Amino acid sequence: MHTWHWHNWEGLPYLTCNLLKPWSHGFFTQQFWPRLPHELTQVLQPDALAYRLKQVHGNTVLTPQEVDDHLNSSDDDLALADGLISQQPLQAVWVASADCTPVLIGDVKTGQVAALHAGWRGTAAKIIPEAISKMQSHGTNLADLRVAMGPAIAGEVYQVSVEVAAEIGTTIIPHNQPEKVITALYDLPNPPLLRDTEPGKVRLDVRRVNALQLEQLGISGEQIAIAPYCTFQTPDHFFSYRREREKKVQWSGIVSIGK
């Protein structure tokens, strides 16, 4: 089992994962609200440059250079995307989440990192495979990746429609008949679906679907860690949009290193 550790910064708690030990990183809690990434980067690595996005529940993954190019050519304050991949050392990449899965990735050979926002829509659009494909185009080998999924809403409390479950399910079970996809999901070992008493509804474990997408790429279970925390069920530490219906977030970030 991969271990997760609590740390304190000026009395405020944040979480790290031993799988990402080589990199300064953190899954920050609601206690840090409303601090933004440029402030939180000071906690991790004061010399790093912070990058963030305006997240739109898609599967676009940008590099810091693409972010800078976009900002230089438009009036926007932030680029629209849901993932960032570093290109150089000392780049801190950040994502915000409140029930969606924050995903931090490191490459032990190149030292490069990625931060992704994978809610159900991003997962259905295969944002993690998209990001990894982009990392591979920058020289990454799959065996060198370490992937940590932070606190997010857990399957047992995440009720969705059968249609949503089938849409996400087709990313791991390609089939054009939704009911066949649902049946196949139930039959998987450690299934990402749980039954719900309400007709037309199921409980969905989004992080498990992301793990299965990774495994289908050829990434082993030892390279993947999933935080044992549910945002919905841990109100002391995490905002949950489903619980509070408030537009508040916690930030997760990781800093690239040189090799």
Image (spheres, grey):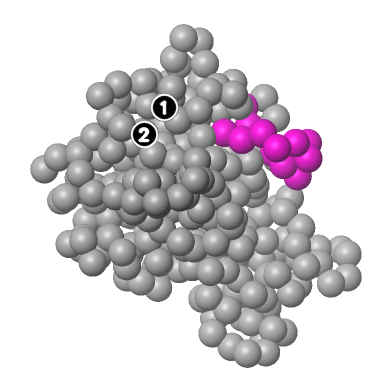
Q: Residue 120 at what x, y percent from top left? A: 62, 60
Q: Which residue is rendered at x = 15% and y = 51% of the image?
A: 109
Q: Which residue is rendered at x = 39% and y = 51% of the image?
A: 73
Magenta segment: 237-250
Residue 218 vertical placement versus 94 (above, below): below
Residue under label 2: 50
Q: Which residue is rendered at x = 45% and y = 16% of the image?
A: 8
Q: Looking at the rendering, which quadrant does residue 241 occupy?
A: top right
Q: Looking at the rendering, which quadrant does residue 161 occupy?
A: bottom right
Q: CA distance from mark 1 to mark 2?
A: 5 Å
Q: Horizontally, is 29 left or right of 153 in the view?
A: left
Residue under label 1: 38
Q: Which residue is rendered at x = 46% and y = 61% of the image?
A: 60
> Which quadrant is the N terminus positioned in?
top left
Q: Amino acid at mark 2?
A: Ala
Residue 43 vertical placement versus 60 (above, below): above
Of callouts 1 and 2, which one flags the residue occurring earlier in the amino acid sequence? 1
